[in-house]
Image (spheres, rainbow, N blue to C red):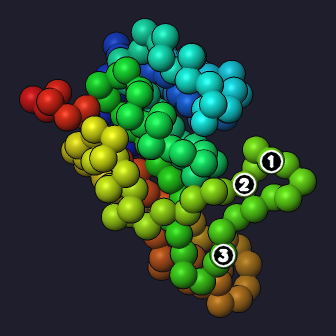
């Protein structure tokens, strides 16, 4: 929330990619005007994204679930983007759920890969941050999660919109 507040004013309308979720509800509780997509497959159906009247798109842990995130990123009609992704970790394999086709990762990016994807899709990163995801378990992986960044967030502007 602190990263969002740092870059996005409450006067800017937000389209949050994904169905209503605890974080989109929190954004609303903080005074942001937020609309969500409706669970459509954003690899195949961008109609909701293309017709938005929002100024900002947020995407919190969405792009790793898409086969072709480039297409959505390229076609977003907004000038501002706040997006986070889980980072690829050398000590943990990609997340997959074989029972639920929506709950799997087609991509787990390293930060530089996500940066390149954004650049190619027409975005310029203005700010970025990373954070860890400690878990209360015993073991080597839980220990590594205390020190290894797990999530990456960016604030980007459409190229040509920098001011």
| Residue depicted at x 64% and y 78% | 92
Residue at far right of view: 99
The residues tagged by marks 2 and 3 sit, at their Cα atoms, a distance apart of 12 Å
Residue at numbered disc 2: 104
Judging depth in this view, the residue of 121 and 156 nearest the camera is 121
Judging depth in this view, the residue of 103 and 152 nearest the camera is 103
Residue at numbered disc 3: 93
First in residue order: circle 2 vs circle 3: 3
Side of 48 relative to 22 (left or right): left
The residues tagged by marks 3 and 1 sit, at their Cα atoms, a distance apart of 18 Å
* Mark in the foreground, 3 or 1: 1
Mark 2: which secondary structure? loop
Residue at numbered disc 1: 101
Question: Can residue 146 be seen in the rendering of this structure?
Answer: no
Side of 93 relative to 119 (left or right): right
Q: Please determine whether, in this image, residue 55 is positioned above or below residue 89.
A: above
Percent of width and height locating residue 117: 37, 51
The answer to whether the residue labelled 2 contacts the one labelled 1, judged by CB atoms less than 8 Å apart, is yes
Task: Classify mark 1: residues with Cα within 10 Å, few (<14), some (14-19) or many (20+).
Answer: few
Judging depth in this view, the residue of 73 and 86 nearest the camera is 73
């Amino acid at each position: 929330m602190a990263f969002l507040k740092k870059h996005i004013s409450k006067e800017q309308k937000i389209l949050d990619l994904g169905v209503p979720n605890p974080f989109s509800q929190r954004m609303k509780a903080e005074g942001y005007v937020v609309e969500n997509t409706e669970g459509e497959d954003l690899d195949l159906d961008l109609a909701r994204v293309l017709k938005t009247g929002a100024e900002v798109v947020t995407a919190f842990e969405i792009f790793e679930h898409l086969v072709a995130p480039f297409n959505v990123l390229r076609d977003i009609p907004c000038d501002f983007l706040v997006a986070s992704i889980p980072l690829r970790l050398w000590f943990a394999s990609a997340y997959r759920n074989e029972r639920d086709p929506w709950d799997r990762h087609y991509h787990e990016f390293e930060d530089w890969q996500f940066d390149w994807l954004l650049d190619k899709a027409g975005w310029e990163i203005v700010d970025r941050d990373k954070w860890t995801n400690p878990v209360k378990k015993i073991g080597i992986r839980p220990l590594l999660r205390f020190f290894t960044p797990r999530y990456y967030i960016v604030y980007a502007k459409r190229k040509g919109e920098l001011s």
